Amino acid sequence: MPDVLPEPPGLDIDTVIYNYTIRKETEDSVDVYVGNENAAGTGYIFREHDQWRPGSLDGTEINKVIGIGGIHRDQWGDGFIDVEGNGSVEDPRVIYTYRVDPCYNPQFDPNCPGYVTPVPDIPEVNLDDLYNALEDENVDLERKTEIAQEQNEENLDENEKKKKEEEEEQKRRYRLEKMMSASDAAALFAESQMIKQMNEIANMQANVNGYYSKSIPGGVYRDSVQLADTQLPDNRRGLRNNLAQQKLHQQMIDEQYK
């Protein structure tokens, strides 16, 4: 039966259906037994008896449905078809119908009858076996290293402290200059964008309104100044200056050849 029935627990057999064809002589009497042994003890789970008496015809087929009432699969042993008398069965077939009761194990679902709320198994812990960080060599070594570093920092002289302060001050100034540079760049970019937008607006306005034209009257413009005399007198003072400069120039040239 392990090769016939499925494996899940809670499987109960409800009905056995079987059929076969009898082979015998008409005058013979034959008894056929169909059943299953009791796997949990002696005897049978069920055993059906078919009596074929004289007068029954050869080749008669029989079909039967036997209600079992729900017997668990663990109790079903080997099945059998036994024939007593001068005859045989042909094309026998046995079918088992079953159902699966999920609450066969009450712990399958909290809604099953008999379900018991599981209690977790909490192991006992020996406090002496717990990890103590204060006794860990690695932790102690790390703590000693931190203490040594703190002592080294305390032992720094004033010059080293001052040097560190100067470095920090330089870093702060650098960050401030970098921030101001970024701010100036942003302001310059915003100003250039504003000028660009103003130029675009002016160009658009010029394209819309067009250019204004203005004509300048032409013609001939004549000189209106008239001289009263036709000959101007010589400028004697200017003549004397010219002669004096000419004489000085000549003296300078003569000095070069002496």
Image: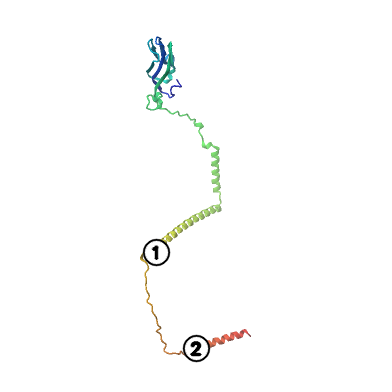
Residue 249 sits above or below residue 138 on the image: below
17 to 127, vertically: above or below: above
Q: Nearer the viewer, residue 194 or 107?
A: 194
Q: Is residue 135 above or below residue 185?
A: above
Q: Which mark is residue 203?
A: 1
Query: Disc 1 or disc 2, which is closer to the eye?
Result: 1
Q: Secondary structure at mark 2?
A: helix
Label 2 sits on residue: 237
User: Measuring 49% from the left and 88% from the top, which residue is drawn there?
Assistant: 237
The image quarter in which residue 83 lies: top left
- First in sequence: mark 1 vs mark 2: 1
**The residue under label 1 is which amino acid type?**
Asn
Viewport quadrant of the N terminus: top left
Seen at 44% across and 59% down, the residue is 189
x, y percent for residue 134: 52, 37
- Rate crowding at label 2 as few (under 14), some (14 to 19) or many (20 or more) other CA atoms within 10 Å: few
Distance of label 1 from label 2 (alpha carbons): 63 Å
Which of these two is toward me, 179 or 6? 6
Determine whether 235 is above or below 76 in the image.
below
**Helix, strand or loop at mark 1:** helix
